[in-house]
Image (spheres, grey):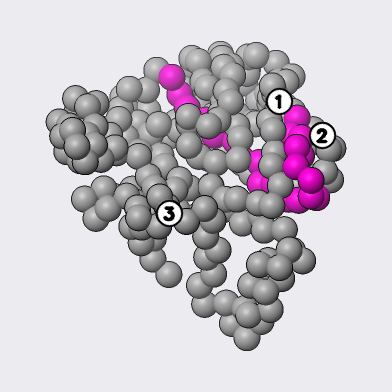
Amino acid sequence: GKPFARPWVKRHVPAILVQWYPGEQGGYALYDILFGKVNPSGKLNYSFPQSTGNMPCYYNHLPTDRGFYHQPGQPNRPGRDYVFETPGPLWAFGHGLSYTTFEYGNAIVSSNTLDDDDEIKLTIPVKNTGNMDGDEVVQVYLKYNADKEGPSHALRGFKRVNISKGETQNVEFTLEDDDFEWFDTQNNTMDTLEGEYTIYYGGTSDISKLKKLTVEVK
């Protein structure tokens, strides 16, 4: 039950089915997935590191956790921060494969600003672009843009939805005042701070694979 470092496996194996401590029915569950009776939809609840030197490895990292020079290396070309590798995870928190594929459209927000005791409704269109019905876990993250020292982004909600092949579903989230709470370095407290926030959404915590939009808190 540990997040092992398996870079060789990722390079050579197209898909991995992970199931720890499954109990008496574990064999049946594995059988159903491997033979296509069940379409897998699980997502990782932690990040897999690339190596023991890549620890700690978590999605909501601080800016300094990715190095100072931002010059990652490769096996044939050493870098300055991580000498022989990139600093990102092998598989990110929230990652998971399926027998189908999903495409995220541009989200619609009920308002671009959030006032006191208000809320923002976020509607995310998700289309099943594969040939099989399946579940997708839609994830929403938040980042306070003025914060240069805090986490890269923070999970604010997720929903599992079943989408038939070829179908598009509008997945709705409601972000309230306390969802925008961020650590205030001046007062050392959590508070809803005024300014611009970025909302990230998609099927993983990997920012490079997420779509985004900005809203303002007044």
Q: Nearer the viewer, residue 126 or 15?
A: 15
Is 205 drawn above or below residue 182 in the view shown? below
1 or 3: tag closer to the N-terminus: 3
Q: Nearer the viewer, residue 206 or 75?
A: 75
Three-letter code for the amino acid on which mark 3 is drawn: His
Whether the magenta-drawn stretch holds residue 162 is answered as no
Q: Main secondary structure of the magenta part?
A: strand
Image check: 101 left or right of 50? right
Q: Which residue is mark 1?
A: 105
Is 9 drawn above or below residue 146 in the view shown? below
Is 170 drawn above or below residue 161 in the view shown? above
**Residue 12 image label:** 3
Occupied quadrant, residue 105: top right
User: Which residue shows up at 29% across the image and 37% down it?
Assistant: 86
Q: Residues within 10 Å of mark 1 (few under 14, many from 20)?
A: some
2 or 3: tag closer to the N-terminus: 3
Magenta stretch, residue numbers: 125-145
Three-letter code for the amino acid on which mark 1 is drawn: Gly
Q: Secondary structure at mark 1?
A: loop
Picture coordinates of residue 106 (x, y %)?
A: 69, 21
Occupied quadrant, residue 201: top right
Image check: 142 left or right of 24? left
